[in-house]
Image: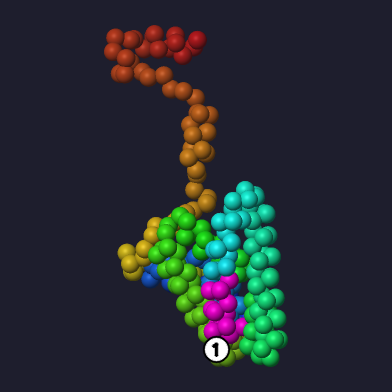
Amino acid sequence: RRIALIYIVSAAAIFVVLTRLTLGIRVLGPFRSILLAWAFKYTGILVGVFFLVLTVGTLIVLRKPVKSLRLPYFGRITIMLSSVAAAMTAALLIGQWANTELLHAVTHLPVVVLCLISEAFATKLSSEGQISAVWKMTTTVILAMAISLLASWPALREVMIHYPELLLVQMGMIIVIARFGAFRLFDKWNPGTDDDDVDEELPSAVTVAETRVDQPAKIPGPEVWPGVTPRTVETVQSR
């Protein structure tokens, strides 16, 4: 079963690429929906969504007080990790007190996944506004639910176990969709700005400036300085 879930990662990646590039629906990054779908596999969708909303709300409330402490990034994120762990412990204690097994499933939620999603939501909330942040959070959760249902499909798991070479086919499909299927059909319906397609390999402004500085300066020719003969230009260049 674990091997089958690993194989389904590529199928989930196809879902993400189709949603973002072909349909043009913006989400909180390319991998958070897959991580969240894995969490839903162990907790159930209803319990997972409920605790996710509760955790995100708690971290959003704590974000400003923590930020006012002027801690570096590692300090802030570890405080968030501790807060999520405390919330999960509280849910477990409440489940034991109420004598219900429903809240025990919360302990299967990966703490790091919750923090990554909460931090991304808080960042979008401050940079793009409430509507855009809620929209991307909602689409991410819906996509995670679809991937979780896909991973629960027994026929797909059996096919992936018996034909692992389909991983190469899935990788080829991702390349084809990304290269030729980026239609972004519903991109205009997305609120906020499109900032999740920035290519980190593109040269930055600093790199371009440094490149220009390193290049030797070119002295304008006679066509730029009327009245200056080519011999004068050669004399200046030699000096």
**Amino acid residing under circle 1:** Trp
Is residue 118 visible to the viewer in this orientation of the structure?
yes
In this view of the protein, which residue sits in the foreground, 11 or 159? 11
**Which residue lies under the disc numbered 1?**
153
Q: Is residue 126 above or below residue 236?
A: below
Q: Quadrant of the N terminus?
A: bottom right
Q: Is residue 170 above or below residue 205?
A: below
Q: Is residue 160 above or below residue 85?
A: below
58 vs 24, left or right, is right
Q: Secondary structure at mark 1?
A: loop
Q: Is residue 126 magenta?
A: no
Q: Residue at x 67, y 60 (%)?
A: 79
Is residue 162 visible to the viewer in this orientation of the structure?
no
157 vs 192, left or right, is right
Q: Main secondary structure of the magenta part?
A: helix
The residues colored magenta run 43-55
Residue extending furthest toward the front? 97
Q: Position of residue 2 (x, y in %)?
A: 67, 82
Q: Position of residue 132 (x, y in %)?
A: 41, 63
In this view of the protein, which residue sits in the foreground, 97 or 87? 97
In this view of the protein, which residue sits in the foreground, 73 or 33? 73
- Image quadrant in which you'd find residue 114: bottom right
Q: Residue at x 59, y 51 (%)?
A: 68
Give the class, few, some or many, for how many residues have Cα within 10 Å of label 1's Cα (few <14, many ≥20): few
Q: How many marks?
A: 1
Q: Position of residue 221 (x, y in %)?
A: 36, 18
Q: Is residue 202 above or below residue 82?
A: above
Residue extending furthest toward the left? 226
Q: Is residue 45 magenta?
A: yes
Q: Residue at x 70, y 86 (%)?
A: 97
